[in-house]
């Protein structure tokens, strides 16, 4: 297995790369997870820490990961091997690539199951199932879905198939084509929903919840949650961005692109939060409802609004599209690795990786439908998978990536590759990549390890 890059596809423009990377970043993490994590951690105080984590840790790692991909020019494992060889480092650095691949694979397996719910909810909304629904009724609909293995498997299968369809079609024919249409559509829907809550709902209540600063709600746990959320939401740490970076032409400024993607990603999370909390405020619902916020609480709001089924359908469609373009980026690293390692076709590689991820996804399915069977300690296997991936694999991957880039690779080379023209800004960014990002992430990781012992 020689780590040489065969001739590969390239993005046809910088814009397409921004769209694809934004598609990877904007997902369930922004619309489903961010609002409930913010809700549980006190809203505004959390959001402030979150933005600091994105700027000081997220963007530097995003830059580092794109840079490794572009300079390595291959899937994560081969990219690291190529770079280690080129700069004369030990070959075991490619372990970072292996960590990345296993992380993306594990996350895809459960991401697809949850994403399946968005499709199920879209159809329930069209069917008018949420009309005048009560709290108990809403819980019932949710439980009927997640306790039913067959339904979960069916939606999981459908979702992973539409993901595989895109990846199997290739970088230009598949990924580029869908992000060109669906990312603009996603923004359009988001703005439509925002204008709905602006004119018709309690946007004041939503804004107040999100932006009234409440210092005593800021705990060390919110800081931890904010960092994990930043990694998950930007989608850094496990090679998805690296493989997208490997299709990036050499003349594009990595820093500028990373800043744009991070800004769009944060904007979407904030807008989704405003939409959701305005509805929550209007109907005096529970903002700290946890993972059920989008699936159990929002239907109550949709059910009370006249014509709310349209709103609900559009909302779950938005969530599905966001999840779809993210899942594509989670599948791509494995497919790129398999097809480049064993010179098999992309289609075959897609079939193999998709089947494996689908099978692993059954663990998540049964964690919901048969939680008694699928628990270890006080968590289900799904909870473990999510907990380990978000709190350990992503930060460890991110720290290794930034350490390799900012400390191992020749500084002069990295400074040029970042692509910032202004001397001062370039130094500032390199300095942040060297000191702030890895040290910040490491401190939080150590605290995390300590507190979960
Ligand atoms: N960022 C996506 C979200 O917010 C999920 C995702 C896509 C991801 N690619 C990733 C998470 C890579 C971690 C690593 O839902």
Image (spheres, rainbow, N blue to C red):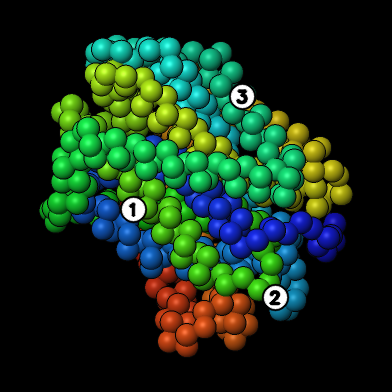
Expressed as whole percent of the image width and height from the top left, the position of residue 400 reads 55, 64
Front residue of this view, candidates 245 and 199: 199
For mark 3, what is the residue? 158
Q: CA distance from mark 1 to mark 3?
A: 32 Å
Does the image show residue 236? yes
- Name the image quarter holding the N terminus: bottom right
Q: CA distance from mark 3 to mark 2?
A: 43 Å
Expressed as whole percent of the image width and height from the top left, the position of residue 428 reads 42, 81
Instruction: Tell me, yes or no, whether the two marked residues, 1 and 2, touch with CB atoms within 8 Å.
Output: no
The residue shown at (41%, 65%) is: 57
The answer to whether 221 is drawn above or below residue 357 in the figure is below
Does the image show residue 110? no
The residue shown at (70%, 34%) is: 165
For mark 1, what is the residue? 226
Within 10 Å of disc 3 (Cα), the crowding (few <14, some 14-19, many 20+) is: some
Lower position in the chain sequence, tag 1 or tag 2 = 2
In front: label 3 or label 2: 3
Front residue of this view, candidates 141 and 268: 268
On the rendered structure, is 90 left or right of 60?
A: right
On the rendered structure, is 4 left or right of 193?
A: right
Instruction: Tell me, yes or no, whether the two marked residues, 1 and 3, touch with CB atoms within 8 Å.
Output: no
In front: label 1 or label 3: 3
Expressed as whole percent of the image width and height from the top left, the position of residue 240 reads 60, 52
Mark drawn on residue 20: none
Q: CA distance from mark 1 to mark 2?
A: 34 Å
Expressed as whole percent of the image width and height from the top left, the position of residue 159 reads 59, 28
Q: Secondary structure at mark 3?
A: helix
Mark drawn on residue 89: 2
Name the quadrant containing residue 157.
top right
């Amino acid at each position: 297995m020689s780590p040489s890059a065969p001739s590969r596809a390239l993005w046809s423009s910088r814009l397409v790369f921004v769209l694809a990377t934004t598609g990877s970043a904007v997902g369930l993490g922004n619309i489903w997870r961010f609002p409930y994590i913010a809700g549980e951690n006190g809203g505004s105080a959390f959001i402030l820490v979150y933005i600091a984590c994105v700027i000081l840790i997220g963007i530097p790692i995003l830059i580092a990961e794109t840079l490794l991909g572009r300079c390595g020019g291959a899937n994560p494992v081969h990219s690291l091997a190529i770079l280690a060889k080129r700069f004369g480092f030990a070959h075991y650095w490619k372990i970072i690539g292996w960590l990345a691949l296993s992380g993306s694979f594990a996350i895809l397996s459960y991401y697809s199951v949850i994403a399946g719910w968005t499709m199920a909810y879209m159809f329930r909304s069209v069917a008018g199932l949420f009309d005048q629904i009560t709290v108990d009724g809403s819980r019932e609909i949710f439980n009927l879905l997640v306790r039913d293995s067959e339904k979960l498997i069916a939606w999981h299968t459908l979702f992973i198939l539409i993901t595989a369809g895109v990846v199997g079609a290739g970088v230009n024919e598949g990924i580029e084509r869908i992000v060109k249409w669906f990312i603009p559509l996603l923004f359009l829907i988001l703005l439509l929903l925002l204008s709905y809550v602006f004119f018709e709902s309690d946007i004041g209540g939503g804004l107040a919840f999100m932006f009234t600063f409440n210092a005593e709600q800021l705990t060390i746990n919110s800081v931890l949650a904010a960092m994990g959320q930043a990694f998950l939401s930007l989608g850094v740490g496990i090679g998805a961005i690296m493989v997208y970076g490997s299709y990036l032409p050499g003349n594009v400024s990595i820093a500028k692109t990373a800043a744009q993607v991070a800004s769009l990603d944060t904007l979407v999370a904030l807008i989704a939060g405003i939409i959701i909390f305005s509805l929550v405020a209007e109907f005096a619902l529970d903002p700290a409802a946890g993972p059920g916020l989008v699936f159990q609480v929002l239907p109550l709001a949709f059910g009370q609004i006249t014509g709310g089924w349209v709103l609900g359908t559009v909302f779950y469609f938005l969530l599905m599209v966001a999840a779809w373009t993210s899942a594509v980026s989670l599948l791509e690293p494995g497919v790129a690795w398999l097809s480049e390692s064993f010179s098999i076709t992309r289609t075959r590689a897609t079939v193999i990786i998709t089947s494996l991820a689908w099978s692993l996804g059954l663990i998540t399915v049964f964690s919901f439908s048969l939680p008694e069977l699928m628990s270890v300690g006080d968590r289900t296997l799904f909870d473990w998978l999510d907990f380990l991936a978000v709190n350990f694999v992503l930060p460890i991957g991110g720290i290794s990536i930034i350490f390799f880039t900012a400390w191992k690779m020749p500084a002069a080379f990295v400074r040029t590759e970042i692509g910032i023209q202004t001397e001062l800004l370039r130094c500032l960014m390199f300095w942040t990549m060297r000191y702030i990002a890895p040290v910040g992430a490491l401190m939080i990781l150590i605290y995390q390890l300590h507190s979960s012992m």
